[in-house]
Image: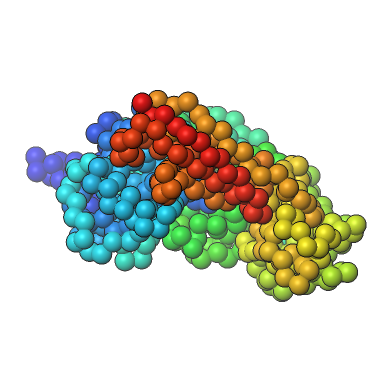
């Protein structure tokens, strides 16, 4: 009898703790694990492929290898991961540590040799197996804020090495206290089978701590549901993404999304699962718990589409369950009642735009020498665009759509024989960015993922260079207001020197220690070039001590 309860007890435990721990590994930091982002979370660049670990609000926290292995890649980029290190482990996984401020001393020396060889701060270097062995808990670098990071933290990933497939790092059993269920911030009803993306906000009220009841929905036809939801853990205030979304129809699971792994090819699919138009309007990510488009992905767990059909006089009970990784749940109950009522929906009507782009067909536009080539599947649905070429301006307009493929554009040059002209793109928010400046036979030719207004502009102003006062560092502010900095070089006494670049601060810098220069005075030359090739050179004599 005693044994029987003992077995029951263990069975119970294994049911509660249903998440499978794939492999054991140490955490990448010594400090307690607190997350400011979790796996699969919706981001502007697509699903988040790792977890963001808080680093006490500062840079310089020691980063450790989670297991034995070898360094397989080091990359330094101005955006994205910034300074990142990849360690491949014998158990078939690769761990990735990104936005670092610097690497450990040995790695730093090794990488600098490559940077000097290439005369470039930006580098992407792969290493062979066993070229650079790392042991579990070795300090490989220090946390930072480099690349597309806007606040110090460690972006940490675990990938299946063979397929370069990011998996949820929480599957490695990292201890993160979490007793707080996901939060539901909005419930939406979608009318399916209409050419417009028709949605309606549904009122919900709390009926017990983690359970909500929606207002009854009375109508008939095909419907889908969408939610705005987020989640947080006990020891950090940061708002993260929800791990699992489940739609249950009359007691059986109809649709399920779960973020355990996905491939980098699927990263952009977020824009199909998310209501992109809603995001443009409200800057809030509304996820559809149905698969109208028939997407086949690793994070959609169900065969069914999640589209619910209701006939008159029928009635269906729907449950939406949101769960986090520790299995805390929030539930919404919905009663769908089949009637002949029609409901009021919100939708964007762009049907007066002059061109209908069929999702499954290529589309070409020609007018007075201007060309636009849109490949099939550039948009998620059949999409209306306003395309026209008037007074030397090319319009490709729809403020509410996401482009999944680059659009090929050709615009005749207005000003001939000028190196400083380029095509600017003005989006619906009034942001002006550089779109392209490659010239072929008196035409600008470029590919763009942005819609909006395209016109020829001129950048005749060279970048600016200003010396900054920084302790133990040589530092310059480099800036270019019109098209942006493309390239910079620093020469000391005639030799090229490695300077780091932090575009977020418009700053290039080098620590005096790493210079290994023993003269009191040096000649320094800084050359900065913008995207159309305007150059600025600053020559100075500097006293170092
Ligand atoms: Zn991240």
Foreground residue, 329 or 535? 535
Q: Estimate the x, y position of residue 53 in percent, counting from the top left.
A: 37, 37
Q: In the current view of this chain or complex, which residue is farthest to the left?
A: 2
Residue 301 appears in the figure = no
Picture quarter with the C terminus: top left
Q: In the current view of this chain or complex, which residue is farthest to the right?
A: 391
Residue 9 appears in the figure = yes
Horizontal side of residue 139 vs 429, given as left or right: left
Foreground residue, 272 or 472? 472
Q: Residue at x 9, y 40 (%)?
A: 2
Picture quarter with the N terminus: top left
Horizontal side of residue 135 vs 216, given as left or right: left
Q: Residue at x 50, y 43 (%)?
A: 525
Horizontal side of residue 485 vs 326, given as left or right: right
Foreground residue, 38 or 211? 38
Q: Estimate the x, y position of residue 161 in percent, counting from the top left.
A: 31, 62
């Amino acid at each position: 009898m005693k044994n029987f309860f003992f077995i029951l007890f263990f069975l119970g435990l294994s049911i509660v703790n249903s998440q499978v721990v794939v492999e054991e590994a140490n955490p990448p930091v010594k400090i307690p694990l607190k997350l400011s982002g979790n796996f699969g979370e919706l981001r502007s660049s697509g699903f988040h492929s790792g977890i963001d670990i808080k680093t006490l609000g500062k840079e310089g926290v020691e980063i450790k290898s989670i297991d034995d292995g070898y360094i397989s890649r080091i990359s330094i980029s101005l955006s994205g991961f910034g300074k990142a290190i990849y360690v491949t482990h014998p158990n078939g996984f690769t761990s990735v540590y990104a936005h670092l401020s610097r690497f450990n001393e040995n790695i730093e020396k090794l990488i600098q040799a490559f940077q000097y060889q290439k005369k470039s701060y930006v580098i992407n270097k792969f290493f062979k197996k066993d070229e650079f062995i790392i042991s579990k808990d070795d300090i490989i670098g220090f946390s930072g804020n480099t690349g597309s990071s806007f606040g110090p933290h460690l972006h940490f990933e675990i990938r299946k090495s063979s397929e370069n497939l990011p998996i949820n790092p929480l599957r490695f059993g990292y201890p993160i206290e979490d007793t707080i269920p996901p939060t539901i911030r909005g419930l939406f009803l979608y009318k399916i089978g209409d050419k417009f993306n028709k949605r309606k906000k549904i009122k919900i009220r709390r009926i017990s701590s983690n359970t909500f009841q929606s207002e009854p929905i009375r109508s008939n036809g095909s419907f889908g549901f969408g939610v705005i939801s987020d989640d947080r853990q006990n020891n950090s205030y940061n708002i993260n993404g929800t791990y699992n979304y489940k739609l249950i129809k009359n007691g059986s699971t109809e649709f399920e999304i779960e973020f355990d792994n996905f491939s980098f090819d699927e990263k952009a699919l977020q824009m199909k699962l998310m209501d992109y138009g809603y995001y443009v309007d409200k800057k809030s990510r509304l996820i559809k718990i149905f698969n109208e488009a028939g997407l086949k992905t690793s994070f959609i767990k169900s065969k069914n589409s999640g589209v619910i059909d209701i006939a008159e006089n029928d009635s269906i009970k729907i449950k939406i369950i949101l769960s986090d990784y520790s299995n805390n749940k929030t539930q919404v109950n919905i009663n769908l009642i089949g009637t002949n009522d029609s409901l009021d929906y919100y939708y964007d009507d762009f049907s007066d735009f002059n061109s209908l782009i069929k999702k499954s067909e290529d589309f070409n536009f020609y007018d007075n020498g201007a060309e636009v080539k849109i490949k099939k599947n550039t948009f998620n649905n059949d999409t209306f665009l306003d395309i026209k070429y008037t007074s030397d301006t090319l319009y490709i307009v729809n403020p509410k759509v996401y482009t999944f493929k680059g659009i090929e554009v050709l615009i005749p040059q207005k000003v001939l024989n000028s190196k400083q002209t380029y095509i600017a793109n003005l989006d619906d928010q009034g942001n002006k960015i550089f779109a392209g400046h490659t010239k072929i036979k008196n035409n600008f030719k470029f590919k763009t993922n942005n819609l909006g207004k395209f016109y020829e502009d001129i950048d005749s102003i060279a970048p600016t260079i200003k010396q900054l006062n920084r302790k133990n560092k040589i530092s310059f502010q480099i800036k270019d207001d019109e098209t942006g900095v493309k390239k910079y070089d620093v020469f000391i006494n005639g030799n090229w020197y490695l300077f780091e670049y932090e575009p977020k601060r418009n700053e290039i810098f080098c620590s005096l220690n790493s210079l290994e220069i023993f003269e009191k005075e040096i000649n320094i030359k800084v050359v900065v070039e913008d995207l159309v090739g305007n150059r600025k050179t600053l020559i100075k004599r500097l006293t170092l001590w």
